[in-house]
Amino acid sequence: MLIFVFTEPCPPSASAQDDPYVAEILTRSKELRLHEEREWRLLLHYQKAMFGYKSLIDDPKFFLAPDGHKNPRSELEATIRGFFQTEPEGDEHPLCRFPLRYEWLKSRLGIDPERLPKAECPRLKNVTETIKPESSALIFPTSHINSPASMFGHTLLTFNSGIKSPLLSHAINYSAVTNETFGPLYAIKGLLGYYPGYFSILPYYAKIQEYSDFDHRDIWEYHLNLNESELKRMLLHIFELESIYSDYYFFGENCSYNLMYLFDVARPSLTLTDRFYKSFPFWVIPIDTVRGVRESGVIEKVEYRPSRSSMIQYIASHLSGDGRKLAVALARGKKNAKQLLASDYSEEDKIRILDLASEYTQYRYSKEYTTKEEYSKTFIALLQARSALGKPEISEYTVPPPVNPEDGHLSARASMGTGLTHKEGKTDYYQQMRVRPAYHSLLDRDSGYVEGGQIVFIDITFRYYDIEKRFELNNIDLIDISSISPRDELFKSVSWKINTGLTRLPIDEGRDPYIFHLSPGGGFALKPASFCIVYAMFESEADLGKLGDKNYSLGLGASAGIMLKIKDYWKMHLYGREIAHLLGEKRGDLRFSAAQSFYPSTNTAITLEYVRKISGESYTPSLAGDVYRDELGLNFNLFF
């Protein structure tokens, strides 16, 4: 949000009430024009607005000047004066609240510490003595499509204080404060900045448990080459931001963008915040932060930490179907481990079955599918059986890392294409332009993304029809999310989708009116082969628009599809859907589509798609006598 400032007062560098030494410091800061220096603007998170500057921090507690959120000079002078105040005492004194501002101003202005009040800062002292960062890592838990707050993944930082186990590091996290669980509402409120965002410091093992065990999310750790003085500046700035909120915007001022301020404050030459803020349009997705940090040269090593579900799936891949079923039965307490030991399975398979059962038992407990008493009884029995087999080295499983997320296609996509439409005996040709800021569709290349996951926001399509000489907005998909998660013996996943936006609907010969639609659905998916996913969903739909005598309709129906990954560079999707609109304007809608995508490179794709849409006055359209429309389109897609 831009702040329009038509007049900006220019406060004097010193006032009659200032101590002579304070007045000297203020005069020196004016001569050096410190308020114009980039490092000062980084400390306050200033960015250029239409007139002047505006801080991206919205909490008034972060500023000492009344107009400090939009006036770098006023805030700098108020900060200098604040350092020399005797009130308030303790942790609330500006010297204690803003230690990095003080360090920077002292180095630039030569402030004599002996002329300052003796401020006691117990909270600052506790933080700096508890957290002595020797190294740091950027952490990227991958996307988790079934959690609205985690659909795009997440980024956070860790500080390692020389402890051998990285799990005992401190995790620095920025996130929105919300209990919202309904995805569309979360997205809308997040787009409009209705959530406050805060920095927090937590033990890393707590975040590992949250992301890995609870959310099925693999974690990538990018170890950084920041030195100790840079890490100290980062820590002091995090301390300054404690309990300070900023309005959280889903695509802009989010967990990824605000984290980049920590990098720039630590090493101002990186200019990560400017790189994204000055781009048009301004959006940042978590994986974009990882890519930006990598391009800056700060990353020195990458490590992959598989989630518990990834570990379970990897162990299961070494067993037959009967072996997997037996492991599940052991974890559920339906089979006894002694029966396994007495069975004809090979010793190696017995070990794998017990290892899988142990991991799956822990997973079930973390999801609260079993009580603590049942968990303890089952888990101890499995460990006892496992120890009887010996050979502990067989239980050492190394899950092969998938494609690194930042090596997948970029987040935004632009498309140019051509095609033809055929409706009621009339054929026309069109040229098409399409743009989508985020993020991944079912036909996009899966490398670096979740297979069967689709997260699309604000996908806009324009067309020009050659024969009719007509330019039109064809459709806007505001939200188009699908989670097609195959079920198996281990994970009874539920697939779901939601789509809402503006589109054209073939009603009769003369018109394809715009309608606003909302279509949620849920169902199940299976993966009969490594290259194939089949799914089916029950769906509902609500339409608003000039549909006939009534301007709305409500319907129920179903959809089904099959996705084939022929090669890493070739994917197909066959899909059918029928909706019977029973309330409002009664009609039936039927849709078939066959699409395939080829990927010449990571950030390019060529898509060929055929679609038939049928709309009838009856609840169930027939293939004859109703309004139908055929489309065949060829598109070139560029990810950027």
Image (tube, rainbow, N blue to C red):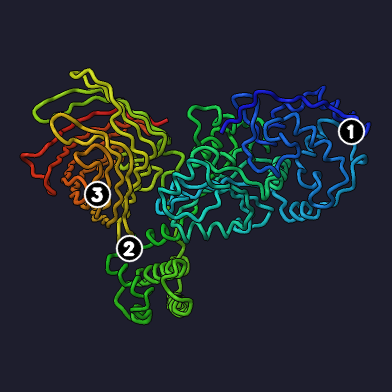
Q: Which residue is mark 3?
A: 554
Report helix, strand or loop for mark 2: loop
Horizontal and vertical percent position of residue 639: 39, 31
Front one among 467 and 151 = 467
Q: Quadrant of the C terminus?
A: top left
Residue found at x 79% / y 37%: 79
Q: Secondary structure at mark 1?
A: helix
Given this view, does label 3 or label 1 mark the residue nearer the observer?
3
Query: Label 3 amino acid?
Result: Leu
> Residue 196 in the image: x percent, y percent?
57, 47
Badge 1 local density, few (<14 within 10 Å), some, or many (20+)?
Answer: many
Question: What residue sits right under mark 2 in the picture?
Answer: 492
Residue 104 appears in view: yes
Please name the residue that numbered disc 1 is placed on: 22
Q: Secondary structure at mark 3?
A: strand
| CB within 8 Å, label 3 to label 2 | no
Q: CA distance from mark 1 to mark 2?
A: 68 Å
User: The disc labelled 1 sits on which kind of residue?
Assistant: Val
Q: Is label 3 in contact with label 1 (beta carbons under 8 Å)?
A: no
Q: Is residue 200 above or below residue 591?
A: below
Residue 600 spot, x, y in % from top left: 32, 31
Residue placed furthest toward the front: 549
| Distance Cα–Cα, label 3 vs label 2 | 30 Å
Q: Tag 2: Cα neighbours inside 10 Å, few (<14), some, or many (≥20)?
A: few
* Residue for point 27% across, 21% down: 471
Q: What's the amino acid at mark 2? A: Lys
Above or below: residue 465 compared with residue 189: above
* Residue name at image x 68 percent, y 35 percent: 69
- Real-space CA distance between mark 3 and mark 1, rounded to the nearest whole angstrom: 71 Å
Sequence-earlier tag: 1 or 2? 1
Viewport quadrant of the N terminus: top right
